[in-house]
Image: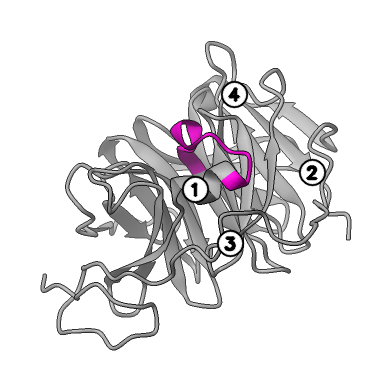
Amino acid sequence: MNRFLLGMMLGLAGCGTSSTKTDNQPESATIAAPFKLPYDLQSPDDDVTLPKALEEISGLTYYKDGQLLCVQDEEAVVYVYDSRKKKVVKDFGFGGYGDFEGIEYVNGEVYVLESNGNLFRFKPESTQIGRTKTDLPAKTEVEGLGYDPKTKRLLLAVKNGGSASSDKAVYSFDLLNRAVFKDMQLNDEQLNGAGIDPKTYKPSGIAVHPITGEWYILTSAGKRLVITNRQAKITYSESLDPKRFRQPEGICFAPNGDLFIASEGDGKKGYLMRFAYKK
């Protein structure tokens, strides 16, 4: 695939597909105006244990009314979780084995992210599986997949950068042009100003709030929720209770704003929490 040159998000692209562009840079090294989180992360409205197959749950996405799609680290299987029945009601495979770190359901298609940046694409229960190499910088490890309906791009959150230019970055994959952009990169000064240890800022999940458009970034290593706007400004940050959030890996929203966070079992069964949206 040809490559785009690094540039701003709305800049003109060169010829080709699957390349990288720089979009937004951090605006500030401090947290913006006071922000009230519309969720009580100390008191989930639902807290359910997942079946053994999802002990290592690594990603989830809203599917349809009352249902989520989930993946786990090693097996190419999508699990349909019914949040009302509180159980897995169906599953379907899409390949063999890999290191699967995120899942998104967009416009009738499922996208599953591998840690190396490769994307699988297919319709639920279909045997026709597409696979796209996103051409992220070498040795970049991603561990979060989201979708921004405003830009119509998938978001790929970097856990470990292969270089300084890809560390602490969020890339996006344009579904129409099959091109990769660098949408955001937080720097150490900004993280320190927000009270976040840069060494522990290793995103494990990312989701876009369906009502406010803010980016919610989950970090498992640092046990923290970080919220930014599209201009790469941190608007909120909250540490997570390690007893409640043993190994948070997946995050998504229902259309009404309810927040779901999934955690690996860390030696026990995985579990899923729902936090009601409080306007």
Dot label at residue 233: 3
Q: Position of residue 103 (x, y in %)?
A: 46, 50
Farthest residue, direction left: 2
Above or below 228: residue 203:
above
Residue highlighted by disc 1? 189
Q: Are marks 4 and 1 in contact (CB under 8 Å)?
A: no
Q: How many numbered marks have been drawn onto this rendered protein structure? A: 4
**Is residue 127 found left or right of 272 in the rendered image?**
left
Q: Secondary structure at mark 1?
A: helix
Residue at figure coordinates x 26%, y 36% from the top left: 96
Q: Is residue 258 visible?
A: yes
Specify the quadrant of the image occupied by residue 92. top left
Dot label at residue 270: 4
Q: Secondary structure at mark 2?
A: strand
Q: CA distance from mark 2 to mark 4?
A: 17 Å
Span highlighted in magenta in the image: 193-204
Q: Amino acid at mark 3?
A: Lys
Q: CA distance from mark 4 to mark 1?
A: 35 Å
Q: Is residue 70 visible?
A: no
Residue at figure coordinates x 64%, y 53% from the top left: 227
Residue highlighted by disc 2? 275
Residue at figure coordinates x 28%, y 59% from the top left: 128
Dot label at residue 260: none
Q: Amino acid at mark 2?
A: Phe
Of residues 58 and 207, which is closer to you in this image? 207
